[in-house]
Amino acid sequence: MDNPFLRKLAYGTDLTEGDRAFLLKVSSGARPAPSRTDLISEGDKPEDVHLVMSGYACRYKILPDGRRQIMAIFVPGDVCDLHVQILGHMDHSIGTLSDATVVDIPPAVIGELIANPRINRGLWWMTLVDEGTLREWLVSMGQRGAAEQMAHIFCELHLRLQAVGLAGDDSFDLPGTQEDLADLMGITPVHVNRTLAVLREKGLIEIAGRRLLLRDVERLREVGGFDPNYLHLQDGKGHGRGVGEARMIA
């Protein structure tokens, strides 16, 4: 069985067979989390850490007038807020964008994970990649036009999903609706629809249901100015292993 949590950690650290067995145990017993459900809401007291094993989730905030800003997309293998239990309350919400399965990891188990130096290195790598991704999103929202920003998001999601074995060479399942994409990009759904049309007219993408087809990955990267260095999928351990060379470890 393929395990996205182990696949992702393997980019940032070397794991022993014992480490893998422990991580398989920790990531077992995932519970269903229906689409559009909060795993934890702003103001809640955080305890368990949430590990996404299938489906999509997001980090978001709601403004006083009801507008929503999505600040992160979580794909399978992602840990939501690793050290959140040290906070007194949540300053944002985490919710699902699709039907998902999630593992609730209690603080005691998080303590066991970070006590293992190899696993701890992998978890720190994941945290640093999350921070790098947020920086890149800030650049997109501040400096990239809508078509550039959308192309960049699609290229990023494609590579992140490839890393955990959940995307083909040129396609993947979209994580949400056009409204979700609007809340991520900070534009209106109408603007999202027009931007999708621009990318289709350029021959860069096609959408069939929830499936996004990247018709020309290299050109889409050029449009988005996409450089995957911030995802650190080739040098997390200094080994230079790319997505296509990732070990199958579970």
Image (cartoon, helix red, strand yellow):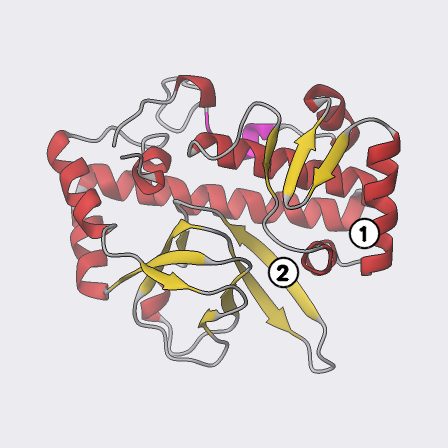
* Amino acid type for the residue under numbered disc 2: Ile
- Residue 37: horizontal and vertical position, in percent? 49, 70
Q: Residue at x 32, y 45 (%)?
A: 123
Number of other residues with Cα within 10 Å of mark 2, as a class: few under 14, some 14 to 19, many 20 or more: some
- In this view, 75 is above or below 151: below
> Toward which corner of the image does residue 49 lie, by quadrant?
bottom left
Who's the residue at 23% across and 51% down the image? 28
Q: Is residue 90 left or right of residue 23?
A: right
Q: Which mark is residue 234?
A: none
Which one is earlier in the sequence, the residue at label 2 or at label 1?
2
SS at mark 1? helix
- Identify the magenta region: 228-233
Q: CA distance from mark 2 to mark 1?
A: 15 Å
Task: Identify which residue is drawn at 36% across, 58% down.
Answer: 102
Does the segment drawn in magenta span residue 12?
Answer: no
Relative to 216, is 245 on the left or the right?
left
Q: Which residue is mark 2?
A: 70
Q: Which percent across, then down, holds residue 131?
A: 51, 48
For label 1, the residue is: 192
Indicate the position of residue 115 as horizontal and vertical percent values: 16, 49
Please, what is the dominant secondary structure of the magenta stretch? Answer: helix
Q: Is residue 214 above or below residue 99?
A: above
Residue 107 picture location, percent across and down: 23, 65
Q: Mark yes or no: residue 117 visible.
A: yes
Frontmost residue, 99 versus 47 = 99
Q: Point out the image quarter for the N terminus.
A: top left
- Amino acid of disc 1: Val
Q: Please report the residue visible at 81 percent of the width from the left and 43 percent of the height from the top.
A: 196
